[in-house]
């Protein structure tokens, strides 16, 4: 009888131990066996493969980042224009899209007495008067550049383009960039002698006494500062504080008072 009781107790102990072990294991590995109990499908993917699908680094950069816009090359397609015979010549527009007719030959004369710099004879007369007025006040407006032939202008422009191409620019981009500092042949006011460069052709000229005098007095003689940093959006040419264009006294007065550049003035 005693043997039966001992055997019964041993059986209960074994069963209890087995139950406890099963219960403990089931708690520890519940997350892994639960899908089988619930009847859910279990993926054969590895833990890494089972993660949500993410964009590749390249895709992520493409989707979330932006790059600097590529500036489209500026068209240099030009329209040929003739020099008006009446007073409208004072407002002729020559720029990257407007080229003087090859048939036009300006009548030139010295910018000031004894100078090798030449200007349109009508502009030279006005510049001489302005030069004399400034000189009487102790200001030197010695001209350093005036008329440039279309052939020389073309050569200078082409040389600049080739320099930019050598630096890695495409020809189209090089032409657009070059035209911000030197216009193509026939597209410059220099090619008809209606603009004049005074003093040193550097940005620091804007700090000189000559520049301050011109700002205060040039309009009275028909001249305007042709290219300024503030108006580059209209002119597409870098600032040239030394470069002054003749537009006639009346036009110069209105343009100076209104703050309009030539392009804006013609569109008003």
Image (tube, grey):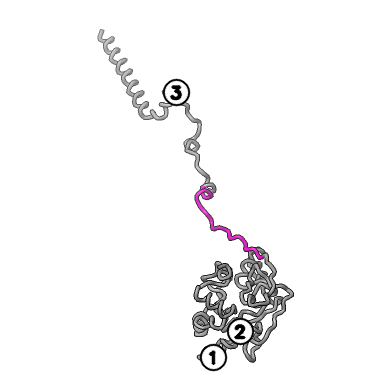
Is 34 positioned to the left or the right of 97 in the image? left
Query: What percent of the width, then of the height, locates residue 154?
Result: 69, 73
Q: Can residue 148 be seen in this view?
A: yes
Q: What element carries label 1?
A: helix
Circle 3 residue: 39
Q: Relative to 234, does residue 215 appear above or below in the rendering?
A: below
Q: What element carries label 3?
A: loop
Circle 2 residue: 144
Question: Residue lying furthest top in this view?
Answer: 1
Circle 1 residue: 135
* Disc ID at residue 10: none
Q: Can residue 189 be seen in this view?
A: no
- Picture quarter containing residue 267? bottom right
Query: What percent of the width, then of the height, locates residue 113?
Result: 63, 91
N-term mark: 3 or 1: 3
Q: Which residue is drawn at 42% across and 29% down?
A: 32
- Magenta highlight range: 60-76
Query: What percent of the width, then of the height, locates residue 214?
Result: 52, 82
């Amino acid at each position: 009888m005693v043997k039966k009781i001992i055997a019964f107790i041993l059986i209960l102990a074994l069963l209890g131990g087995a139950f406890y072990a099963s219960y403990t294991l089931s708690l520890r590995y519940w997350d892994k066996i639960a899908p089988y109990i619930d009847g859910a499908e279990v993926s054969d993917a590895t833990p890494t493969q089972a993660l949500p699908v993410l964009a590749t680094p390249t895709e992520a950069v493409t989707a979330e980042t932006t790059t600097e816009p590529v500036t489209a090359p500026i068209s240099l397609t030009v329209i040929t224009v003739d020099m008006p015979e009446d007073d409208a010549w004072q407002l002729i527009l020559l720029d990257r899209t407007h080229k003087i007719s090859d048939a036009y030959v300006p009548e030139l004369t010295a910018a000031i007495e004894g100078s090798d710099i030449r200007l349109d004879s009508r502009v030279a007369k006005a510049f001489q008067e302005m030069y004399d007025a400034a000189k009487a006040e102790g200001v030197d407006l010695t001209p350093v550049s005036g008329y440039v032939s279309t052939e020389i202008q073309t050569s200078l422009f082409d040389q600049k383009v080739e320099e930019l191409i050598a630096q890695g620019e495409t020809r189209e981009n090089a032409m657009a960039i070059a035209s911000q500092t030197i216009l193509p042949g026939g597209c410059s006011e220099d090619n008809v002698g209606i603009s004049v460069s005074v003093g040193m052709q550097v940005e620091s000229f804007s700090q000189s006494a000559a520049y301050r005098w011109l700002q205060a007095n040039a309009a009275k003689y028909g001249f305007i500062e042709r290219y300024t940093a503030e108006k580059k959006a209209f002119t597409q040419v870098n600032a040239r504080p030394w470069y002054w264009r003749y537009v006639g006294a009346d036009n110069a007065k209105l343009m100076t008072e209104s703050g309009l550049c030539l392009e804006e003035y013609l569109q008003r």
